[in-house]
Amino acid sequence: MRWKHATSVLASSGLLTVGLAVPITATADTSPTVTIGVGHSDPANQNGFNGNPVISYTDFFGRSVSVHRGDTIDFQTQPTEFHSIAVAPAVIPLPVFYADTDDAPAKGTGLPKVGGGPGLGKAFEPTTCGAQGTDPCVFDGTHAVDAGGIAGFDQNGPAAIDWNVQIASNTPIRDYAYFCYIHPGMQGVLHVVDSTATSDTGNQLETQSSQDQFAADQSEATSLISADNSAAPSGAAGSRTWSVHVGDTPSSRHTSILGMMPNNLPNVVSGDTVRFLWGALDPHSVGFGPDQFLPQPFGWDCGKSYVGIPPSNGPPPPPPPCTEFENGQPEIVLDPGTRGPGQGLNAQQVTDSGVLVGSAYGVNPGAESWSVAAAQPGAYQYHCTVHDFMVGTIRVSGA
Ligand SMILES: [Cu+2]
C-alpha cells in the first residue's frame, strides 16, 4: 500500500541492494503460460479515502500451481496491492522486523525499539528481471529469484503489474515455493511436473477455486471489520475501556485490513481509556495531531535519539554521523513514539504511540497494544504516519 517515504528510507539505509541479474538467457518463447494473481482486486473495499477500511489480499490466486519446464509464469500483482515476492526452492523466512535491544527502550511501548530487517529491505529492491518489456527471470530450482517490491499502480493509477518467471529446461522435477517476503504466511506451492503430466495454463484468477478463495477471504475480512467496528466498551462511564483496532488480520492471515476500527468514538468521557490493538500483519502508528508535529515513521537509530527521515523525491540524504550500525548497515528503526501507554490526551502535547508491528513478525519482546486516557474534553484526531488514509477521531466530553 502507500508506504510513504519508504523507498528513500530504505535506499539510504543500505537495506536497498541491487539484485544480481540471473545469468541464464531466456529462450525465445516467453509469453506467459500461466498467470497467478498476487493479491486480489476488490475496488469496493480498496478506496482508502472514503472512510472505509482497505482490504489487502495477502494471498496468491491460486495457491498450488503445476507447470512444465520451459513454461513462463506471470505473477500478476493486482491493482492497489503491494508485495515483494520470490520463487525459491523453499520459503525463505527473512526477518522483516526485529527487537533492537542495544539501547534505551522505545518511549511509546517501554519495550525495545523495532528495527527494520532484511525482509523489509527486499520490499524496496528494484525489479531486475521479469518486468513488462524485459526478459523473464529464470528459475532453475537452485536459488531464489526475487521480484523486488511491486506496487499495483502505474502512472495512471491502480493497475495490474506483471512479473514473469520462466522455468529453466534443467529444473529438477519437484515442488518449489512462491511467497511474499513482507507478509509472513503468504505462500503457494509450485509443482514442476514432467512433460507427460497435466499442468495448469491460463489465468488462475479466473478458476472456480480462485473465485471461491476470493469470496472466502473477502467474507472473513468483512466479518472481522464489522466485529471490530461494533465492539462495545466495558465498564461504567468515566472508567470504561474502548477498543480501537489499528488494522486487523483474520486468523488465516489471507487478508490484512488497513483502517482504524471503529474510526469514530463520539461518546468517550473523561476518565475513560481508549485501547488500541494491532493486528498480526500490521505495521502502524497512532499519532494525535497534525502530521507535521509527529515523528517520521522511519528513522536512524542514534542510540538515545531518533532521527526521522523526511520524505523526499530526490536522492535520499546519507545517514547522520550519530547513526548506529547493525550487521554492517546503518540501523533503521521505526518511530519509537513520544508517550507511554495510558497517559492523558492533551491538545498541547505530541502524543504518538510510535510504529508498532503485529505478532506475525515475531518481534520479541513486542507490543501489540497502546492506550490513551481521556482527560480534557475536546475532539482529537489521530492517524497512522505510515498509511495516511488510516484516520480516526475521539470525542471526549466531561464526566
Ligand atoms: Cu498504517
Image (cartoon, grey):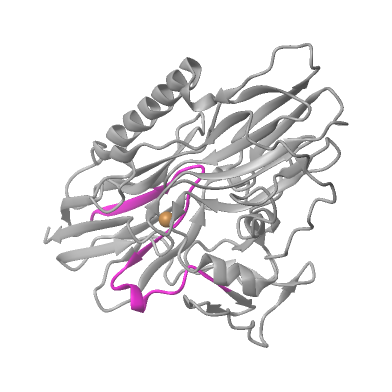
Closer-to-camera residue (225/47):
47
Give the position of the C terminus as an image quadrant. Answer: bottom left
- Ligand 1 appears in which quadrant? bottom left
Closer-to-camera residue (37/83):
37
On the image, the x and y values in percent for residue 222 come to: 32, 31
On the image, the x and y values in percent for residue 332 come to: 63, 69
* Quadrant of residue 68 within the rendered picture: top right
On the image, the x and y values in percent for residue 322 come to: 66, 86
The residue drawn where x is 34% and y is 44% is 46
Q: Please provide the residue range marked out in magenta.
A: 272-299
Whether residue 281 appears in magenta in the rendering, the answer is: yes
The residue drawn where x is 66% and y is 72% is 13
* Quadrant of residue 114 within the rendered picture: bottom right
Horizontally, residue 110 falls left or right of residue 146, namely left
The residue drawn where x is 19% and y is 44% is 236
From this viewpoint, is residue 395 visible?
A: yes
Total labels drawn: 0
* Quadrant of residue 97 within the rendered picture: bottom right
The residue drawn where x is 36% and y is 36% is 42
Whether residue 69 appears in magenta in the rendering, the answer is: no
Horizontally, residue 99 falls left or right of residue 88, namely left
Does 223 appear above or below 24? above
On the image, the x and y values in percent for residue 227 come to: 30, 32
Direction front: furthest residue: 28
Horizontally, residue 288 falls left or right of residue 398, namely right
From this viewpoint, is residue 364 visible?
A: no
